């Protein structure tokens, strides 16, 4: 592809920020002017148009970019199902995510190419918007305070996007303290000309270098986001979201003390299972819901649940469509979903997941093309309107992140870590007084950490968090899978009526889908062929 064609593609997909901007209600709207007359400068000529441009960046986070945009890349249903299907706790039932599930991607397969293209498409829209906000402040169109807040929101999304790329396309930070090849950190707008030439001359940085720039963006976001974003709490980034993302990033870097410090910014020091009044965060006014399904369910208004720290907005007028909305992708076919992914007996049978745990009955059901065929999630329930938001960061994650970090820095068995673990787990137990974890349940630090990791698998099942945990702990001597790498799974499509008997706690599971060791090149995705072809200085991941 020649440079002119490359420029046309970039121009079409990312130059015009507001071509698919979302209005305040997140309804997609288009300016009446023809595309060819709608320049990036014209977007920022009023406060209302600048706000539309910002909403356009959020909209791109839901289904941004030209490549398979309707499937929810980067932060619609696609990010959830990619994160789930790369792990062992779901089973892919149809061909939609078979490539991801089996690890047979190539530099041209749709799933990984779309994740790369659409994430960078969102990032470029953020960069164009940042330039526009700065100029609008200089021109007196926006106040400096508003322009800085808008930039902070874009930089939060930019950091979130680059981190998503790191966990799919690069080796974890713990592999050589970030010495492996990372992903390009694009913090400038690519609009052709000199900016395109700059992009084509930049090699892939080290993982550590990508993380350094990512943390700079998170710091800017934390320093400049409001405590409560009146533009749309939860679906618009606020200070608590930046802090929670910082904590998550420090876990991925293995910087446990820094993760503890970040978590302490949100979690009250007085928090214990016996002191529920101390469960509300010190920043952002978040708290755990009383029930495990409290932050899910469109009818319950999951966009405003106090447990959600940041979600990506969907509603009946603006969603990832039948190919990209969470309810459509995960929902049972008998409930008008597509039934693409079910829960694997690997996790459903796990003896560490108590039989009377309320999550089993309140967030899952037997369903599918034949009733009773498979265990399906009901975390996403708006099957017709497809208005379930995409959960990105919940307070439950902050608690479990903190539990893990506290357990790792402690010299012995951390009671604080156990308290945090119980805060998440207890709301799902019938008799917490007798079923909750006690310090005597753990022989050592390792046992506690493994209990925390199991709780993460249970709590975030069908939310896409499994792969990030596998990725970041691949070389960790305590919590890594044995053997390290992509775990063995139930055969792709291998849950049928004849396997329903496997759904018994403690029943052994026949996997069928072989594990992929960490040393195998397939542990990470290939850089898309077009990226390598047009930017020859971008090194392909080895093996591809």
Image (cartoon, rainbow, N blue to C red):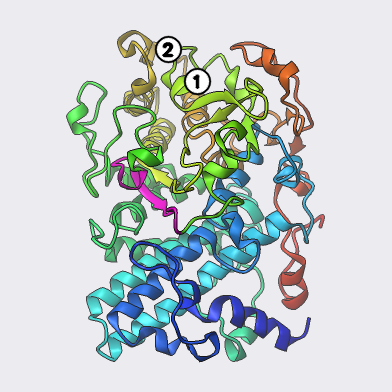
Pointer 2 residue: 441
Left or right, 196 with reference to 456: right
Answer few, some or many: residues within 10 Å of disc 1's Cα (few below 14, many 20 plus, some between 14 and 19).
some
**Residue at 30% across, 84% down:** 46
228 in relation to 264, above or below: below
Residue 290 in percent (x, y) is at 29, 28
The answer to which quarter of the image holds residue 102 is: top right
Residue nearer the viewer, 215 or 123: 123
Quarter containing the C terminus = bottom right
Q: Which residues lie in the magenta part? A: 302-317
The answer to which quarter of the image holds residue 200 is: bottom right
- Marking on residue 447: 1
Left or right, 368 with reference to 415: right
**Residue at 34% across, 88% down:** 45
* Residue 355 visible in the current orientation: yes
Secondary structure category for the residue under label 1: helix
**Residue at 24% across, 49% down:** 284
Quarter containing the N terminus = bottom right
- Marking on residue 308: none
454 in relation to 220, above or below: above
Secondary structure category for the residue under label 2: helix
Residue 504 in percent (x, y) is at 61, 12
Q: Decide which of tag 1 and tag 2 comes sooner along the chain.
A: 2
């Amino acid at each position: 592809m020649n440079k002119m064609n490359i420029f046309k593609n970039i121009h079409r997909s990312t130059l015009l920020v507001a071509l698919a901007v979302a209005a305040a209600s997140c309804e997609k709207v288009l300016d009446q002017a023809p595309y060819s007359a709608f320049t990036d400068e014209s977007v920022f000529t009023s406060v209302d148009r600048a706000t539309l441009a910002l909403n356009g960046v959020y909209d791109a986070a839901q289904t941004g970019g030209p490549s398979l945009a309707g499937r929810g890349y980067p932060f619609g249903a696609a990010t959830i199902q990619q994160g789930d299907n790369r792990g062992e706790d779901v089973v892919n039932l149809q061909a939609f995510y078979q490539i991801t599930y089996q690890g047979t991607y190539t530099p041209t397969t749709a799933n990984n190419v779309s994740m790369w293209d659409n994430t960078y498409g969102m990032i470029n829209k953020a960069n164009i918007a940042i330039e526009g906000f700065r100029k609008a402040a200089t021109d007196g169109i926006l106040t400096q305070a508003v322009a800085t807040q808008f930039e902070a929101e874009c930089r939060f999304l930019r950091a979130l996007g680059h981190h998503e790329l790191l966990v799919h396309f690069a080796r974890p930070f713990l592999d050589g303290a970030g010495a492996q090849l990372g992903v390009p950190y694009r913090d400038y707008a690519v609009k052709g000309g000199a900016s395109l030439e700059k992009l084509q001359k930049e090699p892939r940085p080290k993982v550590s270098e990508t993380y350094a720039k990512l943390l700079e963006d998170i710091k800017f976001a934390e320093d400049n986001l409001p405590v409560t974003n009146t533009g749309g709490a939860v679906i618009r980034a606020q200070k608590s979201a930046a802090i929670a993302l910082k904590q998550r990033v420090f876990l991925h870097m293995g910087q446990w003390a820094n993760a503890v410090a970040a978590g302490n910014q949100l979690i009250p020091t007085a928090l214990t299972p016996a002191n529920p009044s101390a469960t509300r965060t010190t920043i952002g006014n978040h708290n755990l819901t009383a029930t495990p399904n409290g932050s899910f369910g469109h009818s319950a208004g999951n966009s405003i649940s106090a447990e959600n720290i940041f979600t990506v907005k969907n509603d009946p007028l603006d969603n990832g469509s039948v190919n990209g909305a969470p309810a459509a992708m995960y929902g049972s076919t008998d409930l008008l979903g597509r039934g693409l992914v079910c829960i694997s007996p690997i996790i459903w049978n796990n003896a560490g997941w108590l039989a009377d745990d309320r999550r089993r009955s309140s967030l899952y059901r037997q369903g599918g093309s034949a009733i009773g065929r498979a265990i399906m999630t009901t975390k996403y329930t708006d099957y017709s309107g497809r208005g379930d938001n995409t959960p990105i960061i919940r307070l439950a994650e902050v608690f479990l992140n903190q539990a893990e970090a506290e357990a790792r820095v402690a010299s012995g068995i951390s009671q604080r870590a156990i308290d945090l673990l119980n805060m998440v787990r207890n709301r799902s137990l019938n008799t917490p007084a007798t079923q909750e974890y006690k310090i005597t349940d753990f022989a050592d630090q390792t046992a506690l950490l493994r209990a925390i990791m199991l709780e993460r698998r249970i709590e975030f099942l069908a939310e896409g968090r499994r792969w990030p945990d596998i990725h970041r702990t691949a070389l960790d001597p305590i919590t890594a899978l044995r053997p390290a790498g992509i775990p063995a799974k139930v055969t792709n499509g291998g849950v049928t009526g004849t396997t329903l008997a496997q759904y018994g706690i403690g029943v052994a599971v026949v996997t069928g889908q072989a594990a992929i060791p960490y040393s195998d090149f397939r542990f990470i995705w290939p850089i898309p062929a077009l990226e390598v072809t047009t930017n020859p200085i971008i090194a392909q991941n080895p093996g591809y």
